Image: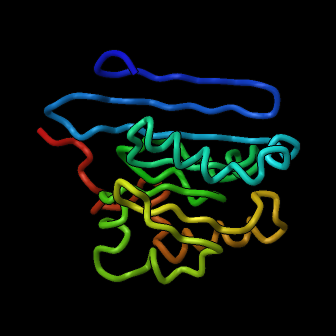
């Protein structure tokens, strides 16, 4: 990544990804990553999806990221940015330490939710997985249950205690 701030959108057959970065020594890095796959591509690289995601989160120094499929992206869309709300709970999620602390501020909700998989990330934070596949028939219900368990207002921009992601 070059410069203090920027963004990149990549598209190919069966996928798209986006990343934004903000590299300012006086403010918290707001790097985040989105990766959306169609069913065919997902199945082709199924065994490498988690490794690919971890490598991208690490390379882009993300503070938040997710992997999903297009319908889930559309289903959970809410106006706003990462400075106002968490975009959603998707098939595969990365929550940096700032979001882990925020989601567990008054309790241990993030770790008590029945994830398919939850894993500590090598540079801090956690990676959560809802189901074995983003195309699982139960995922719509699990997305809703996870948001409800963690607090719906954290995902719709209506929470008062959202972390101040800017350090001045």
Tell how many labels.
0
59 vs 50: above or below: above
5 vs 76: above or below: above
Q: Position of residue 163 (x, y in %)?
A: 27, 56
Identify the image quadrant of the N terminus.
Answer: top left
Along the line of sight, the residue nearer the viewer: 38 or 60: 60
9 vs 131: above or below: above
* Image quadrant in which you'd find residue 93: bottom right
> As drawn, is 86 to the left or to the right of 14?
left
> As drawn, is 47 to the left or to the right of 30?
right
Q: Position of residue 114 (x, y in %)?
A: 59, 81
Along the line of sight, the residue nearer the viewer: 141 or 6: 6
Q: Identify the residue at image location x=44%, y=66%.
A: 120
> As drawn, is 21 to the left or to the right of 105?
right
> As drawn, is 164 to the left or to the right of 65?
left
Q: Identify the residue at image location x=43%, y=59%.
A: 121
Q: Position of residue 43 (x, y in %)?
A: 84, 49
Q: Identify the residue at image location x=75%, y=57%.
A: 134
Along the line of sight, the residue nearer the viewer: 96 or 86: 96
Q: Position of residue 117 (x, y in %)?
A: 60, 72
**Outermost residue, top side:** 3
For the rendered model, the colour scheme is rainbow
Identify the image quadrant of the C terminus.
Answer: top left
78 vs 2: above or below: below
Q: Identify the residue at image location x=38%, y=60%.
A: 125
**Outermost residue, right side:** 40
Along the line of sight, the residue nearer the viewer: 8 or 124: 124
């Amino acid at each position: 990544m070059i410069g203090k701030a920027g963004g990149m959108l990549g598209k190919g057959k069966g996928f798209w990804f986006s990343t934004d970065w903000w590299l300012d020594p006086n403010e918290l890095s707001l790097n985040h990553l989105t990766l959306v796959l169609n069913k065919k591509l997902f199945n082709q690289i199924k065994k490498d999806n988690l490794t690919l995601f971890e490598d991208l989160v690490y390379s882009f120094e993300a503070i938040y990221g997710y992997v999903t499929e297009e319908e889930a992206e559309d289903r959970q869309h809410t106006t706003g940015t990462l400075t106002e709300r968490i975009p959603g709970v998707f098939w595969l999620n990365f929550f940096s330490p700032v979001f882990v602390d925020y989601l567990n501020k008054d309790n241990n909700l993030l770790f008590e939710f029945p994830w398919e998989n939850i894993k500590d990330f090598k540079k801090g934070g956690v990676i959560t997985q809802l189901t074995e596949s983003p195309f699982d028939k139960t995922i719509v219900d699990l997305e809703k249950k996870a948001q409800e368990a963690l607090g719906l207002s954290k995902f719709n921009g209506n929470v008062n205690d959202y972390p101040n992601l800017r350090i001045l």
